[in-house]
Image (cartoon, helix red, strand yellow):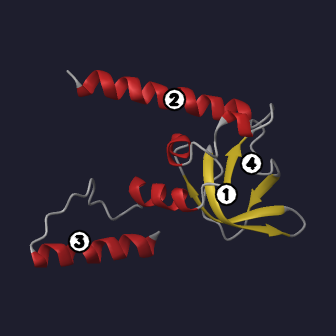
Amino acid sequence: MQMAAALRKQLYRLMIRLGIDSLSTSLDYSAPSDNVREAFASGVFIQVAYKISNGTYLTVKDIKAVLFHRSCCVKSALQWVVYHELLHSNALRIKTCSRIDGTWLVEIAPHYYDLSNFAKGKIEVPLCRLYKKKEEKCLEYGSHHYD
């Protein structure tokens, strides 16, 4: 993410030099922006893990319990994460992780996160919550958009 932020900053400086208007939503380079994390999520939307009540994570795809790899700097308080690698050792571990807003999943890949693709159980409930949250966002946006 640091490399992505550095590249973004470099491109922004180049745009200024060339006189190209920036349509960016944020110029805060101290932390990865939602746009970068959402782009990452759109590339690996199948590789998602969700935090369940006991503090462990389940992969959405295979419904397997996973832990963060020791090199992962993501904190365990996050509800939804995307990961790049799934490592098999004494336990399944996910590596190269990033927190995401779960509603991005149903926006990015509604075909994959269609509730009919998932069995009733541990993953269906949080996915239902994502759809409800997405509907609330749409209603909120619609009411403010036309005021």
Helix, strand or loop status at disc 2:
helix
Residue under circle 4? 57
| Label 1 vs label 3, nearer the camera | 1
Q: Quadrant of residue 15?
A: bottom left
Residue 112 lies, with reference to residue 75, above or below; the image says above
- Mark 2–mark 3 distance (CA, rounded to whole Å): 33 Å
Comes first in the chain, label 1 or label 2: 1
| Label 4 vs label 3, nearer the camera | 3
Residue under circle 2? 133
Residue under circle 1? 47
Callout 4 amino acid: Tyr
Instruction: Please tell me which residue is depicted at 66% across the width and 55% down the height of the picture.
Output: 46
Residue under circle 3? 12
Position of 53 with respect to 32 (left or right) is right
User: Label 4: few (<14), some or many (≥20) within 10 Å?
Assistant: many
Residue 9 coordinates in the image, percent (x, y): 28, 72
Callout 2 amino acid: Lys
Residue 69 lies, with reference to residue 113, above or below; the image says below
Which quarter of the rendered picture does the C terminus lie within? top left
